[in-house]
Image: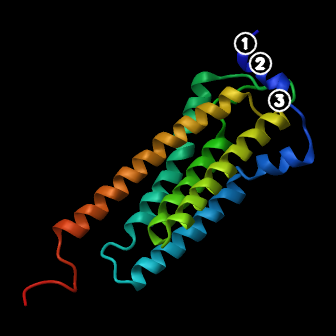
Amino acid sequence: MRVDERASRALIHPDGVSEVLADLGNVQVAVPVLAAVLLYVARRARLTGTDRWWLPAAAAAVLMALVPALVVPLKELTDRPGTPAVPPGTGYYPSGHTATAAAAYGAATLLLLPWLRSAYARRELVIACVVVNAAVGLGLVRRGYHWPLDVVASWCLGALLLVSLWLFLSRSSRRTSAGTPSRRTGPS
């Protein structure tokens, strides 16, 4: 018996709490949270006169669009059956709910970090993001929707996407601040 199956049997406990936690990874929940952050960050950047104010929000939106473009082919390729708690079928690896949560809440966190003034607020936001993503994964496994490995694979995919977004955002902000004069600077 695989370790994944043993872990699933030990963790599975379908209840209302695990259902609510799993639902935090639904597109209908996670994407509107990201959309609200995209609008807030874009508006705030525009109001402060930031060059290319739209770029961080657009990059995060593209990242979110990449999730189904990557997850669906992986599900088709692996064709993994679900746990005994779900109807017979395949396509459970990796977890789309986990990948959606990781990308949406992670991208929202990355976009909000530069706008927070204190290290305490930034740390608390990162902790909240990690806790929410862990809760989604736990809810999916406890409810029996996914094997633990399905969730871990999606966390890895989410980490790869978020590191890519972070690198892109840090490169574009360095380029803007170091290479191009802003509207407020220039010849005196």
At which x and y percent is residue 88?
Answer: 82, 25
Residue where numbered disc 3 is placed? 11
Q: Check disc 2: other Cα within 10 Å, few if <14, some if 14-19, many if 20+.
A: some
Q: Is residue 31 visible?
A: yes
Please, is residue 81 above or below residue 23 in the view? above
- Amino acid carrying label 1: it is Arg
Q: Is residue 91 visible?
A: no
Question: Is there a contact, CB below 8 Å, between mark 2 and mark 1?
Answer: yes
Question: Is there a contact, CB below 8 Å, between mark 3 and mark 1?
Answer: no
Give the distance between the C-alpha atoms of the residues marked 2 and 1, in whole angstroms.
5 Å
Q: Residue at x 84, y 37 (%)?
A: 143
Q: Nearer the viewer, mark 2 or mark 3?
A: 3
Indicate the secondary structure of the residue bearing disc 1. Answer: loop
Residue where numbered disc 1 is placed? 2
The answer to which of marks 3 and 1 sits earlier in the sequence is 1
- Amino acid carrying label 2: it is Glu
Q: Nearer the viewer, mark 3 or mark 1?
A: 3
At which x and y percent is residue 85?
Answer: 87, 29
Q: Quadrant of residue 174?
A: bottom left
Q: Please give left or right for residue 31 compared with residue 42 in the image.
A: right
Residue where numbered disc 2 is placed? 5
The residue lying toward the viewer, choosing from 99 and 132, is 132
Give the distance between the C-alpha atoms of the residues marked 3 and 1, in whole angstroms.
14 Å
Give the distance between the C-alpha atoms of the residues marked 2 and 3, in whole angstroms.
10 Å
At which x and y percent is residue 83?
Answer: 80, 25
